[in-house]
């Protein structure tokens, strides 16, 4: 499940920019579980779109790296909600370089650690 991107596209180069955003979104969805997702996206996109990151950020409102993180964390939310998987295993499954990185990014974007997030789910349910 890819995160939706929001906003209209400018008239000048609009179709090309929309095409770029679509390609990046598809590639991120495909490769987000790989630790080197950004490098893979860049390898595929950069020749055709040298300023891909700037265009993507202008259209979507965030750089590709942040979008990758949000896609990964969205997948982590689902795993935290729907499974009893260990947090270290979840961090590996979503392409993070380790539990510490996963915990720090999750807390930055959600305001709570993955442990606290799961505990809140149990209290609600």
Image (cartoon, rainbow, N blue to C red):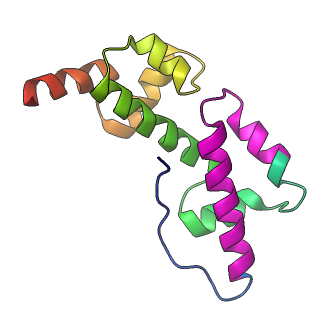
Q: Extreme bottom residue here?
A: 11
Could you tell me which residue is drawn at 32 percent across and 20 percent down?
83
* Quarter of the figure that contains the C terminus: top left
Q: In x, y percent, where is residue 103? A: 42, 22
Could you tell me which residue is drawn at 75 percent across and 45 percent down?
41
Side of 46 relative to 2 (left or right): right
Q: In x, y percent, where is residue 18? A: 66, 72
**Whether residue 101 is situated above or below residue 71 in the rendered picture:** above
Could you tell me which residue is drawn at 19 percent across and 20 percent down?
119
Q: Nearer the viewer, residue 36 or 30?
A: 30
Q: Main secondary structure of the magenta part?
A: helix
**Whether residue 82 is situated above or below residue 18 in the rendered picture:** above
Side of 10 relative to 49 (left or right): left
Q: Nearer the viewer, residue 28 or 99?
A: 28
| Residue 113 in sight from this viewpoint | no
Q: Extreme left residue here?
A: 124
Q: Which residues are magenta?
A: 14-43
Q: How many marks?
A: 0
């Amino acid at each position: 499940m890819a995160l939706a991107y929001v906003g209209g596209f400018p008239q000048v180069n609009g179709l090309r920019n929309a095409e770029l955003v679509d390609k990046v979104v598809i590639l991120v969805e495909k490769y987000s579980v790989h630790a080197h997702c950004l490098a893979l996206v860049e390898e595929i996109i950069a020749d055709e779109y040298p300023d891909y990151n700037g265009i993507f950020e202008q259209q979507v409102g965030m750089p590709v790296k942040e979008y990758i993180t949000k896609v990964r964390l969205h997948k982590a939310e689902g795993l935290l909600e729907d499974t009893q998987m260990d947090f270290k295993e979840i961090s590996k499954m979503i392409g993070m370089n380790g539990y510490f990185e996963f915990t720090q990014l999750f807390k930055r974007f959600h305001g709570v650690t993955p442990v606290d997030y799961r505990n809140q789910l149990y209290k609600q349910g």
